[in-house]
Each structure stands twice: as structure tokens, then as C-alpha cells.
Image (cartoon, grey):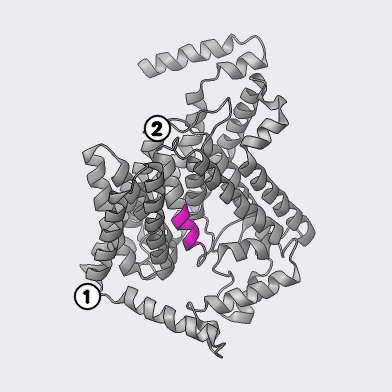
Amino acid sequence: MKIISSVSSQIKVISKSKNPSDFFNNIPRKFADIIVFIPVFLFMFLPLYQLINDFLFPTFHSTSFSDSVSGINNFALVLGIVFLIIYIGKLFASKQLSSIKSIAKYNIHNLLFTALLVMMILSTLINGVTDYVVNGDSYRQESLLSFFLYFCFYYFCTSKINSKKLKTILFYTLIVAGLCVAVCEMINFLITPVLAFEYASGPSAIYQNSNHYAYFITVNIMLSSVLFIKEKKYILKALCIISFVINTIVLILNDTFGCYIACLFGLIFACIVLSITDKKFSKPAVFMLIIFILITVIMSLWFDTVLNNIITLIKDIFKISKKSENAGSAGTGRWKLWTYTMDYIKEKPVFGFGLEGMSGRLLTETNISDRPHNEFLQYSAFFGIPATVFYVAGILAIYLKALKNKYKLDIYAKASLITAFAYLVSSLFGNTMYYTTPYLFILLGIGTIQNSETENTCIKA
């Protein structure tokens, strides 16, 4: 009743607005937060929904996920437009758009990402509007609109969520969902087959590919580790350490070495970041790193996935350094994909080949994959080198801004930036996917500190 009364009173206030400035000023910040929160929450909850759906309808394993993501994206598009209208309206009402210099100073990362989007449009116009641009391919389902949603909604709009309570709900919803999926995958792998994963390909759980599931595991491991360190509630701490341990076990069973490396580097990065922001050496962060290594050593007594990957990596390095005839097989064929993609990039360095423009050619000439399995090379091949420069520069600007405001970062900003770092490491060996890539941009959004006059800085936890 209190909520209904509060909403009713707020509507009355808004209805009495005398001009557009009053109208936008009278819209509460909480309302704007909730508009963005709803699609992001649905995306965080989606893995648990998909798990339940796979138990009920296992034969629809490969199609229901894409249908769900498509629905959430449509929802995000509509609510994102509403949010942007409110956001820009509030800036006009508060007269914050009068200083272009001030906007540029506080939004370098946003300007760089905007430049990237412009390059995407130019690349598309030059290379032509193909079916890939409109609908994406049948497997990855990433249209040009998908990439715009990554940056405009999942990153930018999410970066404006100010409520600590809403961030708490988002993060722990994802951790619970990830833990449920991991427990089922562990049972499926170690004890008995799980009906929900009957049609899964290898240790991929609810995902179409084990690599895709590994991206999701990486996010869960890193979020769980940082939140365990910084969380003050014992129940949530217990949830985080359980999630960390089980997801680490499943990561080793999953056998995606790129994501294992990403978690290892991410945990080391956490030691550095938390030591700097806490103004003292972070023993808890080192403790989490030690647990990760211990689990690896113990698991290696029964499963030699990590050990074999390390040995293979060393052999691959020698192959490449000696320019061996079969060097292309290094990294399960990734080296061949990378070298071919770099040759393509040289052909069209400025605007690229357009979305999926060289994918068919790559698959035909390498007989391995239609994507380079390196997201930075992917951006360059699709949209040109300048686009990738804007992408990398935008990400660096977010981290440099966080470094400058390191003592203002709250628990969620720290967890987001550390987890995003690990994801970015994994992206050196992976591809963008419609159901995993949004996590990166959500994390970058929550990790972006706001410090203009109209936007609050991250709330200290």
C-alpha cells in the first residue's frame, strides 16, 4: 500500500508540472533507475530461467535461450529509449548541457564509444546492409542493433543506475543463477546425467558451446571472489565462497583454458586493485588466489585438463617461435584464425568488411571457424582498425577514471571492474555472443564512476 501511495503521489506531482523543465525535474531518480534495472535484472535471472526451462523442455535447449534474449533485448530497446528521453530531459532541465567542455571532460569514455558506433554505421554503409546487419547469423544472432544495444543500453544506461539496493539485487541474482547452473553441471559431469543437459554439447550446461559457458563461469568466479572479500553480511559471504569454489571446480571440468587464464589474471588483478583502494596489502584477495590454485592442484589429481593445457601451450609457443609448418594448429587452431584475420584486416584497415563480412571466407579458408576467436581482431575485421582503437580507448578511459577516483569506488564498482578485466582477458581467445557479451557491458556500466554535477559518485559500501 505504501508503494502504491508513493507512486500515486508522485504522479500527482508530475501532472502538476507547469513546463517541460518541471516535468523532467519532477520525475524521481528511482523511477529512472528502475526503468534500466528491469531488463538488466531479467538478463541476470535468465540463466536460472533457462535452467528451469531445460528441465521442463530439454528438446528446446538451443532455441529457447535465443528467444528469451530476443525478448529482453526488445524490452531493453523500448525502456532504453524512455530512459534516454528522461536522462536528456533532466540534463536540459538542470541546464547541464550548456557546457560542451564540461560534458567532454566527464564523458571521454562515452565519446569514444560514440565514435565507435559511428564507425560501425560508416562500415555498414560502405559494405552494404546485408541480412547479417539486420538479423545477424543463425548461430550468434548479433545484428548491428545488438551491438548498439551493448553500448547504448547494457553499458550506458546501466552506468546510470545509482541505487545500491538495485545493484545488490542484480549481482546476487546472477550469483544464485550461476551457482544453480554450476551445481547441476557438476552433478551431470561427476555423478549422473542431468535431464536438462541431455542435448548439451559437452560440458556446456545451458549454453550452446562449452566456451560460452566458460565466459559465464568466469563472470561468476570473479564476482563471487570480490564480493566475498568486501561483503559484510555473513550469509552473503557464505553464498559467495560456495559459488567461488563450485564454479572453479566446474571451470576446470569445462576445460576452456582461455577462461582459466582469464580467472588467474583476474584474481591477480584483484590483489592489485584491492591493495590500492584499501591502502594496504589485500591478504583476503591473495587468499582467494591461493584457493583457486589449490583447487586446481587438487582437481589435477583426477582431471589433467589444466596440466595438459599448460603443456600444450608451451608446445604451441615453440611451434610459433620456430615457424613450424603446423603452427596454425596452435591454440586449437586460433593462431591460424588470427593470422588469416590479420591478413584480412590489412585489406580493409579503415572500415573493415562490415558485420560478418569476412566470416564465410574465414571458415572456407581455415576450415576451423567463421570468427577469429579474438574479439579485438573481430572488431577490426568487421568495422576497421579505428573502430577497435575507439573501443580499446573507451575501455581504458573507464579504468583510468576509476583509478583517478579510486577511493570513491564502492564494492560493486570494484567487483565490476575486476570482473570485466577478467572477461576482457578471456575475450582475447573468444567471440562475442548474444547471451554472454551483455555481461561485459553491464559490468563496465556499473563500474563507470559518475562525477558530474547531476550524477552522484559511486556510493561507498
Residue 74 visible in the displayed image: no
> Does residue 67 lie above or below 204 as drawn?
above
Q: Is residue 160 shown left or right of residue 237?
A: right
Q: Residues within 10 Å of mark 2 (few under 14, many from 20)?
A: few
Q: Which residue is mark 2?
A: 460
Give the amino acid type for the residue marked by disc 2 in the picture.
Lys
In the rendered image, residue 423 lying in the magenta stretch gets the answer yes
**Residue farthest toward the bottom in the current orientation of the protein:** 325
Sequence-wise first label, 2 or 1: 1
Q: Is residue 58 magenta?
A: no
Distance from disc 2 to disc 1, alpha carbons, whole Å, reads 43 Å
Within 10 Å of disc 1 (Cα), the crowding (few <14, some 14-19, many 20+) is few
Q: Residue at x 71, y 27 (%)?
A: 99
Examine the image and state in which quarter residue 199 appears.
bottom left
**x 37%, y 49%: residue:** 223
**Can you say whether 420 is above or below 458 in the image?**
below
Find the magenta span and give its range: 421-427
Q: Secondary structure at mark 1?
A: loop
